[in-house]
Amino acid sequence: MLASACTAPAVPAPSAASAHAGTAPAATTAPARDVATNLQSPWSMATTPDGAVLVSERDTGLVKELTPAGGSRDVGRIDGVVHEGEGGLLGIAVRPPESGTPALLYAFYTAAADNRLVRMRLRGSPGSYALGPPETLLTGIAKGSVHNGGRIAFGPDGKLYVTTGEAGLRSPAQDLASLNGKILRLDPDGTVPRDNPFPGSPVYSLGHRNPQGIGWDTQGRMWASEFGQNRWDELNLIRPGGNYGWPEVEGIDTGQSRFINPVAQWPTSEASPSGLAISGTTVFMAALRGQRLWVIQPSADGRTASVTARYTGTFGRLRDVRVARGGRLWLLTNNTDGRGTPRPGDDRIVEVPAAGG
């Protein structure tokens, strides 16, 4: 994306529609380069309609805007963010303006009593963005020191999808009355769509432990990455109303026909998957504990997948990934979150070839 001629130049951005992109261009052989450095516990990336890139910082509650020089500036601090363990300012997503309405930034964060979803007007232009006052859309998602979920994204249907963890409590994942351990589907104003699988409920799928990545391929299929407990991390093909088994099962279990099995699974030491991005039908999945990028090619019927690891140990922990221009990827590292080993310049956004894309 390019900024308009009347605005300051924006950082070359990942595609705002990366989750729905067409077949990836041929990967280049250009080396990795730093797009931004010295971020503090970054969690999510979002692109504005005019090409600016925003990043959420979990612990500080700040939304940052990347600058062309490889740094960042503060867009605003979201009031009420409470960092504790894995909680804080988590997922962000931008909804482009429609019919004269302003661009809006949506955010999922941990507050004093719960996890919640808000939206704010994006004021200004690249190089000068600021946040308007927050409007609360959804509250009452139980928070925990672990397993808050927190990824948000607009689907190809224009609806807002929200991942929630089970907050370490296990049982809420199977409870339709609870918002935890779910993928939720909302209208942009926070109301429940009439065509949701459970009438009157924002729940789109259930039986999740801690899903932190969602995206859609060019076949319209929705994919989600999920943290396992002691055995298996997962990549799931999400179906409306589907039950993915937690805490009854973890990973593939052929003996539980009422639950949907993952399409791919990894030992927890090799993944701990967070954000994902999709180009065509190729899924790129960022791994935290595994410190690598998983490149996944699902089969045409979505039942199996081939997987390849890239950049193992090269950048440390990876929290998020986005498809950029010219067959490139942006990787968001997460070495300053208390669980990694920071390197000079961490945390950073690194641009790399889309290996396997």
Image (cartoon, grey):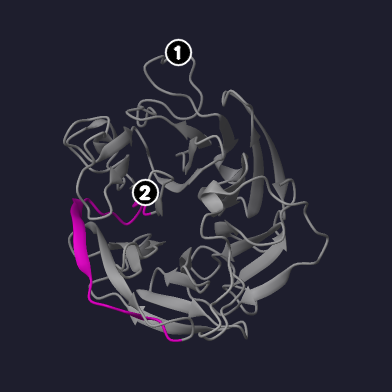
Q: Which residue carries the number 2 mark? A: 158
Type of amino acid under label 1: Gly
Res 62 seen here? yes
Which corner quadrant of the image does residue 270 belong to?
A: top right
Q: Can residue 82 be seen by looking at this rendering?
A: no
Query: Looking at the picture, how far across and down is residue 342, in whole percent?
Result: 59, 72
Q: Quadrant of residue 35?
A: bottom right
* Depth order, front residue of 217/169: 217
Residue 247 vertical position relative to residue 146 in the rendered view, above or below: above
Horizontally, residue 97 falls left or right of residue 315, namely: left
Q: Nearer the viewer, residue 94 or 276?
A: 94
**Element type where label 2 sits in the image:** loop
Q: Is residue 141 above or below residue 260?
A: below
Q: Residues within 10 Å of mark 1 (few under 14, many from 20)?
A: few
Q: Amino acid at mark 2?
A: Gly
Residue range of the region highlighted in magenta in the rendering: 128-150
